[in-house]
Amino acid sequence: MLPMWKRTLTRKVQRIFWIYLHYDFVINSMNDFKTTDAGVRCRFVPVTVDNYCRVREFREEQRITEYREKHRNGEVGFFAECDGRLVGSIWATINRTRVRSVVRMYMPLMPNEALIHDIVTAESFRGMGVGPFMVSRMALQLLSEYGVNRIIIDVSSRNRPSLRMMEKVGLEAREKVFSVSLFSTLAYHKTLRTLSHAL
């Protein structure tokens, strides 16, 4: 894992110029994915104004501000809780407007579409199925509780563990996409390839 100063610097640079090659996974209905349980007993707990600071149980103290801002900005967040301890988190951004909108500097969403992002599991709980558990539970929430029409999950082409996580949820990449952001604005977004099989 990168030190905090490197992550902060990377985020600052990305706000100026960011090239991103990613695979997009798409969920349109409950039939598009598998509901999976973790290898340890987990609860799926909403991130609220009363509990966002608990992120320090599995991430750095500095993340508290980030989670507070996500919640304040209307992003949908959940924690994975195991035996009373938080061991992971997942977020989604929903386009609640009536027009196409670009979220997180690179992802165009149509009205009532959602992007799942920032899937994080505590190091000591990796490999126990917590990530797939959170992805499947978030997809269920977005489709049933929030009534979204379509869910996108993007994964960097270099992130093999996350690509394997998508396979565990029964998802196959639909597209390979190239995005460029300049000054926090999407400058270029092109589908390089439409995929018909798993990676």
Image (tube, grey):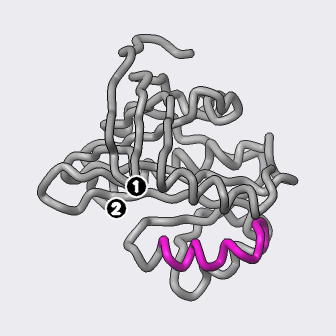
Left-right relation of 15 to 109: right
Q: Residue furthest left?
A: 98
Q: Which residue is mark 2?
A: 145
Tell me if residue 84 can be seen.
no
Q: Which residues are magenta?
A: 57-70
Residue drawn at (69%, 57%) of the image: 7
| N-term-proximal mark, 1 vs 2 | 2
Left-right relation of 6 to 131: right
Distance from disc 1 to disc 2, alpha carbons, whole Å, reads 30 Å
For this rendering, which residue is in front, 39 or 114? 114
Amino acid beneath label 1: Ser
Residue drawn at (57%, 88%) of the image: 50
As for residue 163 lying within the magenta part, the answer is no
The x, y position of residue 106, in whole percent, is 39, 45
Tally of numbered tags: 2
Q: Is residue 132 above or below residue 137?
A: above
The x, y position of residue 129, in whole percent, is 72, 43
Q: Which residue is mark 1?
A: 184
For this rendering, which residue is in front, 123 or 5? 5
What is the crowding at mark 1: few (fewer than 14 residues within 10 Å), some, or many (at least 20)?
some
